[in-house]
Each structure stands twice: as structure tokens, then as C-alpha cells.
Image: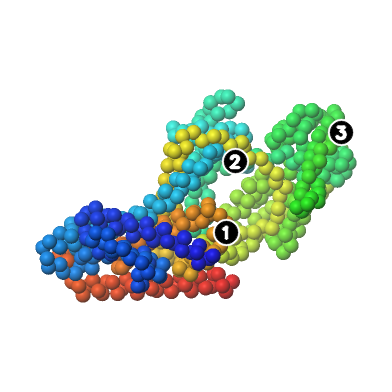
Amino acid sequence: MTLLAFFLLIGPIIFVHELGHLIAAKLVGVEVQRFSIGFGRPLARVKLGETEYCLAPIPLGGYVQMRGQQGEEVDSPELKDRALSHKPLWAKLVVLVAGPLANFVLPFVIYFFIFLGQTTQYPASIGSVLDGSPASAAGLQTGDRITAIDEESITSWDAMVRIVSRAPEQELHLQIERAGQRLERFVTPRRATRRNDLGDREDVGRLGILMHSYAPQVAIEDPRSPAAQEGLKDGDIITSFNGEPVVTVEDLERHLQRTSDSLIRLTYLRADKASSPIGTALVYRSSHAQILPRKDSGLAVGIVAANTSVRSTTPGRPAAKAGIQPGDRILAVNGAPLSRWESLQSELLRTPERPSTLEVQSPGRESRQVTITLDMDPLRDQCGSRLDCYLGATPYRTVHLPDQVPIRGRGSFALRAAWHQTTGKIGELWLAIRRMLTLERGLDDLSSVVGIFYIAGIIAPQGAGPFLDMMAYLSLSIGVLNLLPIPVLDGGHILLYAIESIRRRPLSQRAREIASTIGLVIVLLLLLVGLRNDIVRFWMN
């Protein structure tokens, strides 16, 4: 099955690449002598017109054999007009670029049909605003919907993220809708670092907003408080406060700020484990409570939003080593107050290799200062090797996503989404290659056909979506790599033809042979490095 998955993965990529060369050659009048998918003695062949079409047994590539492709002499005047070597430079470039271009078209088509099947999307509605973020400074609030950025209409969360990500430290003009009113805000996204699909770090813009909203989940401040005496526990979700519905944590915080000495009537949900025929499941049970605040004792109600409360810790990780325990609340990080767990993560990941100071409070005790440094663990996956950061603490985090909205104009939506997806991944690949050439990135992430074989076996059982996504990624990779100016690759041939155009005479056959030998050596060395990496990555770890 892995072998079949491998053939199905790379077969269309090879076919499309060589088909691009074939079509371009015929369009500019070059004689195509053979079109082969695979290498070796043909298993099947058929001749249609002047071209022989072959299927060979080694599915590691293919080729289009054209007259005059290697710069050989063509004596017959009738054949010179059909030889690639005697075509003008523009025609040669068309033929050579057509293969990589076809590898770019294939992912675009794949993504187009994937997005065409999408009928709904998330709106650009703000679920939460992070502490000290550009959005908070600009006055954005939970429930706001972003309708336009710099006069560009925004119809989805993804479209908003795409525009903001490419504008770090650049002021943006936002048009928002709040409770039926249209407002304008100017906000400058903060520069942040993320890892792309290739594992590379890149700078992006961040507003400090989240799509999801927090459920009104509570933590107990003190075991002696009225709420604790009434039986409330960490993680309970408040659903009504004095008869008024509570939907988000912001609703809960507003009610808590308005509490007086009068009796409070609460309805809350508590998650309990229950056995079922398919295993253990969480069942939410509704309960009621009546709480009389005691403001004179300093305990008041005794509940707070659980946004920064620790639900569990992992032994041996930084949080547990620092003495942080389940039930503790993290009040501040490096002196900055916290109200959302994501704010803690964002601050810690700014300088993950440096110690950070947390203000932590255990129920019923005074707050204390602890110093932690994130664990940096090596991680290997299909993107290569990198370091992942671990705090080792899990929060109470019950969130709600907004309702999705129908996509209007699905055809145009699919075209735009496929274009952005394709060009974005091409940009990531070029960035990775550039960093390798400038030694900013090592060769440890190179892979060979062995790695592709291994990944094909992993991806195939996951379904058509991940399989087609991997096919698109590999097609883009092959397209980008073939444009590198290495002899024996399309980019190398383009380079040689460009040199001939500058010299105004063809290179000698000997010069071409030397260039091809150098290119072949480079390619073989890269393949050996990729093979070594695959063996270490997939079989020795």
C-alpha cells in the first residue's frame, strides 16, 4: 500500500511537469522525439505522429527528448527549424519554464477544488482581546466585526489574518461594526515570530485578537469564600447570574464587578466523567447556588474568571519545577498583568531561551514570584528538525467559536484562496532555499525519494485531503527546485542558453558536457545528503 501511495503521489507530479515541456515544445514548433514517464527500458510505448510516448519502470522522474536539446549539431536545413538549439531565446525559455510552471499550476488546481467544496467560513468577528495588545490599545472589543482594512473588504477571519500578517509595524485603517454601528480605528500590528510550514521562523503582524471567546469558567479565590462554602469548584461554568444569561467570560466579569451585598443566584454547569459503551465521556450537569457576598471580610463572592488558572501540570517540566500547582492563578508575567492564557504564551515565546518572572497566587494565599525558563525540546517531523517550547502547564480553557457564515461567490472565493495558498507556499520554499544558500539554514531538512516514500505511507491513510495537500506541496517543491541554476535542471539549461545569448554564439559540446557533469555531481550530493537525513529522521530516532 505504501508503494501504491508513493506512485499515486509522485506520478501525477512527474506527468504534469513533463506534459508542460511537451505542450510548450509543440507550441513553438520543436520536434519532440520521445515523451517518457519513468526511466529505463519502456514497459509500454506508442507512437503518435513524430512522438513516441513511453511508460518506464523506474518512477523517479521522466523526460521529454527534443531535437537539439543538448546543443548537438543539426545539419539538415529542414530539421534546424525544428531543433530547440536553433530556436530564439524566448522560445527556449518558454519550453524550459513550462515544466516548473506546470508544477505550479497543479497545486493551484488542487487547492481550487478543495476550496470550491467549502461552503461556509468563519467571520472576522473578535472573540477575545489580549492584554496589552495593539487591538486593546486601539479600543477593539469582544464582539466587534472587522468589515474592511485599508479600504479592502473583509469577509472572513482568514482574509483578515492574511492582511494583518504581512503588515508588521505598519499602521492599518480598520472599519468595524459594533452593535449595529460602524466605527473606524487605526491600529499598528505588533511584530511577532511564527514558524511556517517548513519550520522556518518568519516575522508577521499580530493585532492580539482571538477568534474564539472564553466560556464563563470560574476559579475559587479562597477555600473559605462564600462561593467555595456553597460548593462551587474550579472549572465550573456560570450560565446565569441573578436570572440573566451569561454567555462569555466578559459577561461574567461585568456581573462580578457590579456585585453588592445582596444575595446572588447562580446557575452553573459542572463536567463529570461518565461511562458509556464507547468509553469515558464528559457530562455537564446543571446546578444552582445562592451566595451572600461578604465584602467586609475581604472575600466578597470568592470567584474569578479562570482564564489564567492552572488545571494541571506536567511533572519535570518548568511549571512543576517552579512549584506551580493545579488551582494556582498566574496574575502577571514579567510585571505585565494577565487576563488571558494566550497573553502568557505570547510573552513567554518572545524570548523562550531567557528566564521569565511569573506572579502566581495559590487559593487563599498571598501571591509569590517564581522564575521559569521554557524547556526547548528537539522535534522532528516532515518539516525537518526544530526546537519546541514547553511550559508544562494546562489552563482551564473552554472556548466557543463563532457561527460560520455562508460563502458568497464560491467560485471567486476558491480562485482567490487557491492563489493565496499557492503563492504563499512558493514564497516559503524560496525563503528556505535562500536561507540554505546564505547558510542561515542547514541541510538537515533536505529529503530524498526515500523520505517521500515514507511520508506517502503515513499520509495516505489520513484521507484524500491531506494526500492532495502533500501532492501540492511536493509539486511546488519540484517546480521551485527545477528553476535553480544547476546544470541538468531546467534552471541550469536556462542559464546556459542565457550565456549563449550574451556570447552570441553557442557553447561548445565540451563545455556543455563539463557543465552537465558539474550539475550531476551537485544533484547527486544533494540526494545523498537527503538520503542520510531520511535515514536519521525516520529510522534512527
Q: Nearer the viewer, residue 302 or 199?
A: 199
- Looking at the rendered structure, the secondary structure element under dot 3 is strand
Mark 3 is surrounded, within 10 Å at the Cα level, by few (under 14), some (14 to 19) or many (20 or more) other residues, namely some
Q: Amino acid at mark 2?
A: Met
Residue depicted at x 64% and y 59%? 390
Using the image, determine if residue 24 lies above or below residue 145: below
Using the image, determine if residue 138 lies above or below residue 477: above
Residue depicted at x 58% and y 37%? 404
Query: Which of the two discs, 3 and 1, labels the residue nearer the N terminus?
Result: 3
Query: Which of the two discs, 3 and 2, labels the residue nearer the N terminus?
Result: 2
Using the image, determine if residue 470 lies above or below residue 185: below
Q: Which residue is mark 2?
A: 211
Using the image, determine if residue 123 lies above or below residue 235: above
Q: Which residue is mark 3?
A: 290
| Inter-mark Cα distance, 3 to 1 | 53 Å
What is the x, y in percent for residue 249? 70, 37
| Inter-mark Cα distance, 3 to 2 | 33 Å
Q: Which residue is mark 1?
A: 461
Q: Nearer the viewer, residue 332 or 321?
A: 321
Query: Where, by quadrant of the figure, is residue 515 drawn?
Result: bottom left
